[in-house]
């Protein structure tokens, strides 16, 4: 029987700046090249919970403030409860930048205004305002999570965020910052990893140049749906070359 | 007014010419450091000089060039800032170089292309006769932050101008239509007739699909490209303003997107300079593109077509233009990530390369981030070759051409400059 994954893309036309679509393309292609069928479900404003419930893998990208407000408005208590359930039950997901912040408790704007988040993960974000700069630039991190598929993997990306994120349990940090700023520019943590859900500031987009991470998400989705499964090997020499070049440049 | 800033600017200009250094920003930079109000003072001293500012993500250089050429052909004395020198210091340099030591300028019109981020400060300093807003797309997010931030800055800056200032704005762009309506200025809008792209076509180069007034998703009856088209808000009824389109005029360049540039220029010239459509047509027929914008260059006896492609909207339009000219083109894609290109190359994943990949005869990729561009093509199941060195890439791609064939080079800003240098043997900026 041909395996099939349903990839849920939350708010593609609102939460999608910075080429985040590349993550979806990467997941799709890396499945397709291995004979795994994919269906990308676009979960737009007003989507039905039934659509979200059948997804095997979730993705949500970054956004600008205005767009995020629209999403915030649409994300009802019911939707939040379902997303929490999916995350708790191990549905793999990737949440970039604005989406990562949105999973937390709140986002405090530069003017002091507090926007509530979904409160699914124990973290909060604050924009210090004043003259504190946006945290912008190429980034390299080392994955801390002990999951053997990705442990110690070095990832590259590009971060661009005004908010500083603080996670309650630093043991849940997705990675340790090697170059760049990470969650807040201070504590050297980057992102969060809870069960199979990853929140991170890495654009780039993250998956094309970090195929191990893409495969990890695919593998987890397959395991959850079909039990044990082994991914076919793909030639990642171009991906690795692209990553090495930017790593080398960062020193 | 004091002579010192103008003279110091002129001295620097002379010195930089002697030393072979670019004279397009330094003189203004020095003059501004002597007197930060120098631009204000010079423009105030020349109330009869009509200043036109051209702003927008894509098309600034082409539209400015059209305006200047048509105005000159119709008897006006025109000057403009050098391409790339579109911050306040570039405009200061340009004003200083044309003024006498007392700040007097003997020209009728100044056409200044204006950087998106600097538009507010340039507006404040120049108090222009007219402003053209061409479009607003995601571009260099590492430098500009978010595109909404730019929109917000523009909106506030325009609201502070004298109410008789002319605003010529793109009425097919939801955000610009909103900004124009709220400005309270003497506004006119250009646009295009209904486009072919339907509402259902999902592209990733779009930024304003939601109502700028009430945040409801807009209904698009049709789109020309990206988020430009005929829209209406189902909730608050916000819709396109009355638009002007000059469909009888020729398009000397490839691509429908250039029609927006033509309509913007024609609207300003017919309404406020009394130049007739026949005269505009005459100039358009003789129009040759600005460097690196659909520029044709002969290289080793082969045809090369250089197209600046610097953000998702502009890259998509370049692809469409290439495919409209040739069914099965040979292309070279050059991606750099230097400061003028934007350090973040994420945007290449918002380009729709699939059709090009399907149709291209050959694809070569080069530039500082050639492997990233290679990945973009790989993940569209395309075949391509990577040549890290640009000169080798060009020579390699040229060798693939048969007689009469053209190589299309799509390049980011610094990559375009580098490409031209290799092709022409000269440096322009």
Image (cartoon, rainbow, N blue to C red):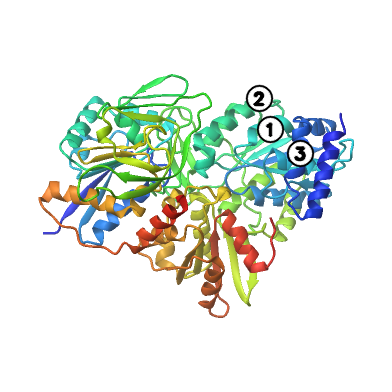
**Residue B225 percent coordinates (x, y):** 49, 49
Residue B392 is left or right of residue A234, and the answer is right
Q: Tag on residue B160?
A: 2
**Marks 1,2: beta carbons within 8 A:** yes
Q: Out of B351 and B33, give the one closest to the viewer.
A: B33
Position in image of residue B134 (x %, y %): 60, 43
Q: Is residue B260 left or right of residue A51?
A: right
Q: Quadrant of the C terminus of chain B?
A: bottom right
- Callout 3 environment at 10 Å: few (<14), some (14 to 19), or many (20+)? many
Task: Please indicate, yes or no, whether residue B83 appears anywhere in the rendered image.
Answer: yes
Quadrant in which the N terminus of chain B appears: top right
- The residues bearing labels 1 and 2 have C-alpha atoms spaced at a distance of 9 Å
Q: Earlier in the sequence, mark 1 or mark 2?
A: 1
Mark 2 lies on a secondary structure that is loop
- Crowd band around label 2 with a 10 angstrom C-alpha radius: few (<14), some (14–19), many (20+): some
Numbered mark located on residue B123 in the image: 1
Circle 1: element type: helix
Q: Which residue is mark 3?
A: B30
* Distance (Cα) linking label 2 and label 3: 28 Å
């Amino acid at each position: 029987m041909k395996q099939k994954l349903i990839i849920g893309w939350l708010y593609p036309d609102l939460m999608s700046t910075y080429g985040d679509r590349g993550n979806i393309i990467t997941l799709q292609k890396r499945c397709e090249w291995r004979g795994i069928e994919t269906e990308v479900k676009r979960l737009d404003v007003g989507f039905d919970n039934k659509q979200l419930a059948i997804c095997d893998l979730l993705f949500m990208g970054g956004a600008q403030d205005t767009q995020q407000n629209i999403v915030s408005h649409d994300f009802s208590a019911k939707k939040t409860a379902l997303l929490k359930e999916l995350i708790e039950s191990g549905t793999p997901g990737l949440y970039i930048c604005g989406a990562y912040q949105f999973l937390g408790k709140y986002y405090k704007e530069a003017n002091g205004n507090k926007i509530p988040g979904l409160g699914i993960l124990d973290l909060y974000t604050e924009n210090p305002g004043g003259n504190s700069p946006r945290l912008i630039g190429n980034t390299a991190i080392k994955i801390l999570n002990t999951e053997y598929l990705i442990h110690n993997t070095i990832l590259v990306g590009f971060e661009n965020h005004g908010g500083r994120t603080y996670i309650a349990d630093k043991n849940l940090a997705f990675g340790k910052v090697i170059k760049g700023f990470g969650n807040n520019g201070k504590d050297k943590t980057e992102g969060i990893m809870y069960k199979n859900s990853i929140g991170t500031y890495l654009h780039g987009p993250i998956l094309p140049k970090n195929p191990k991470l893409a495969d990890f998400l695919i593998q987890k989705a397959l395991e959850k749906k079909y039990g044990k499964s082994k991914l076919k090997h793909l030639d990642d020499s171009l991906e690795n070359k692209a990553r090495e070049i930017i790593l080398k440049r960062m020193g | 007014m004091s002579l010192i800033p103008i003279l110091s600017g002129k001295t620097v200009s002379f010195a930089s010419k002697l030393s072979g250094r670019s004279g397009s920003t330094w003189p203004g930079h020095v003059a501004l450091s002597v007197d930060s109000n120098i631009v204000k003072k010079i423009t105030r001293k020349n109330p009869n000089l009509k200043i036109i500012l051209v702003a927008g993500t894509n098309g600034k250089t082409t539209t400015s060039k059209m305006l200047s050429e048509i105005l000159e052909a119709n008897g006006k004395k025109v000057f403009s800032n050098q391409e790339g020198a579109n911050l306040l210091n570039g405009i200061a340099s340009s004003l200083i170089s044309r003024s006498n030591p007392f700040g007097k300028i003997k020209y009728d019109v100044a056409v200044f292309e204006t950087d998106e981020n600097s538009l507010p400060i340039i507006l404040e300093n120049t108090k222009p006769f007219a402003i053209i807003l061409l479009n607003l797309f995601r571009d260099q997010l590492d430098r500009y932050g978010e595109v909404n931030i730019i929109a917000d800055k523009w909106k506030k800056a325009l609201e502070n101008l004298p109410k008789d200032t002319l605003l010529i704005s793109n009425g097919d762009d939801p955000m610009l239509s909103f900004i124009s309506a709220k400005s309270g200025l003497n506004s006119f809008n250009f646009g295009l007739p209904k486009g072919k792209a339907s509402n259902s076509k999902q592209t990733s180069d779009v930024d304003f699909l939601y109502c700028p007034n009430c945040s409801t998703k807009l209904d698009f009856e049709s789109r020309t490209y990206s988020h430009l088209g005929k829209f209406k808000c189902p909730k608050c009824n916000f819709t396109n303003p009355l638009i002007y389109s000059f469909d009888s005029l020729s398009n000397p360049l490839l691509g429908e997107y250039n029609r927006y540039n033509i309509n913007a220029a024609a609207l300003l010239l017919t309404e406020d300079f009394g130049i007739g459509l026949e005269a505009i047509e005459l100039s358009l027929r003789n129009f040759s593109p600005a460097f690196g914008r659909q520029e044709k260059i002969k290289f080793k006896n082969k045809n090369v077509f250089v197209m600046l492609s610097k953000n998702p909207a502009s890259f998509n339009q370049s692809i469409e233009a290439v495919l409209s000219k040739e069914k099965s083109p040979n292309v070279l894609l050059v991606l750099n990530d230097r400061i003028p290109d934007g350090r973040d190359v994420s945007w290449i994943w918002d380009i729709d390369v699939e059709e090009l990949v399907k149709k291209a005869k050959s694809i070569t990729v080069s530039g500082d981030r050639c492997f990233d561009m290679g990945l973009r093509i790989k993940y569209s199941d395309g075949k391509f070759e990577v040549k890290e060195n640009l000169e080798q890439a060009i020579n390699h791609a040229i060798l693939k051409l048969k007689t009469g064939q053209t190589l299309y080079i799509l390049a980011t800003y610094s990559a375009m400059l580098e490409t031209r240098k290799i092709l022409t043997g000269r440096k322009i900026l």
